Amino acid sequence: MNERKMYLPIAAVVAVLVLSMPAAFAAETADPKVAEPIPEPRSFVTEHRGEFNGVSVRYTATAGETYLRDEDGKPKASIFTFAYVRTDAAGPRPVTFVWNGGPGSASLWLHMGTFGPKRVVVPSDAKNAGLPPYPVQDATETLLDVTDLVFVDPVGTGYSRALGEHEGKEFWGLNEDALSMAEFIRTWVTENQRWNAPRFLLGESFGTTRAAAVAEILETDFMLRLNGLIFVSQALDYAGSTPYVRDNLISHITYLPTMAATAWYHNKVAPRPASMESFVAEARAFASNQLLPALFKGNALPASERAEIVRGLQRYTGLSSEYIERSNLRIQGFRFAKELLREEGHAVGLLDARYTQDQLDDLAAEPSGDAADGAISAAFKAALMQYLRSDLNVDWDRLYLAPADSNLNKEWRWRTAPEGEAWEPWPVNTAHNLSRALRANPELRVLVASGYFDLVTPFFDAEFTLNRHDIEASRVDYRYYEGGHMMYVNEPSRTRLLDDTRQFILQQLRTAR
């Protein structure tokens, strides 16, 4: 007899058995909590050849998942990355792990803006990127001649997700995020046999907050040494980058040089010096030596000194003496963005104060939206989504989260103490983590890249932060660019940033020999 006639398909047998069971028994044996099996990590691999810094390079692009595992060895999170690995070079290749900030930002900005092998081209002069299609070109100045590059999307961004019984909120917090990124790096270097390779971390904005915390975990807990850290738009100690906190005197000091650069750029300084750098240096000195002591004195400030401060603020911000008096000498950074061009009905950008945007409400105290973000974000997203399909052959129906999971910011934990323990909120600060990492690794150095027109993470705050917290000045290199938070959208700044980063990496590689 034909075997196919002797036996019912297994699914049919199960159905018959279930239908013939007493209802109570079937209800007791059904387990609604049984999770579907977690599939193997997805990976899309392509081979490429390009010329970077005049060097011909063959490389593999791997767009794929790395699984983090819990104590039982079960997958708890998928970290999706874009890894560019050179295949025609001998020896232990350096690898640089790159991420953006947020928290809740995928890596598309650094990926498609400057450090990836392709880049979207937006106007260099702070104009709106306009309508699609947006040009995407080879990024021949990027770093694949000297280091492999791994662009990382944290959980809840890009294609990265929590897995199984785990939830995204387990990874959404200052400590939780840092640990997951450190675990990812440990996993990646293990799976790719890179334990004895030179390693660098490169972060932007909150990505620098993260990098400092990750560096300490890698250096002190995982015994995984780093060769260098690159901070783009540094944000370690938030006291200097929170102008909207009313009693935060520090922010009035750290923001003033950026306001001066912005006023100079928009021709609100009279007389206008020929050199922006020298004007900014004057503003630094005024902020530290005159404004800070004056604000500290409060109501005890003598009238003559107050008048001198008003004149100085008028000089360096381009704002009227009446506004400065009404602000009680405390010019809030985000309000400055609205006030500088109020008569024209425009606000300057926060991420990049070179940009301007017409405002619907000309009487509001602060801008509605950000001129820089609105001008370029659509171009970056469009370029990445096209590049994923056309160049990297990523054929996946999973949604690429940029912006992030809608619950990420609502459920993000800044708390640094375990539940049940006393905890008093302070400004977020991972400068102490950096300080401990530098002590654990005496050869570790930091490159700090800052934009003059960044009203989110002002460049003077980088100096204020890293010149204290027991960090040796000789371990930190500062570089400044005529752009904003994403200084690489300004073409001269993009090429300079890449050159400065390349020279920093080469310097640290020479130190390791």
Image: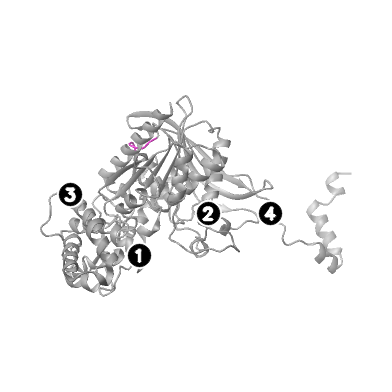
Q: Residues within 10 Å of mark 3 (few under 14, many from 20)?
A: few
Q: Nearer the viewer, mark 3 or mark 1?
A: 1
The tag earlier along the polypeptide, 1 or 2, is 2
Q: Could you tell me how far apart the alpha carbons at marks 4 and 2 are, in whole angstroms?
A: 29 Å
The tag earlier along the polypeptide, 3 or 4, is 4
Protein image colouring? one colour
* Residue wearing tag 3: 278
Q: Quadrant of residue 448?
A: top left
Q: Could you tell me how far apart the alpha carbons at marks 3 and 4 are, in whole angstroms?
A: 63 Å
Q: Which residues are magenta?
A: 139-143
* Residue wearing tag 2: 175
Quadrant of the frame with the N terminus: top right
- Image disc number at residue 248: 1
Q: Could you tell me how far apart the alpha carbons at marks 3 and 2 are, in whole angstroms?
A: 40 Å
The tag earlier along the polypeptide, 1 or 4, is 4
Query: Type of residue at label 1?
Result: Asn
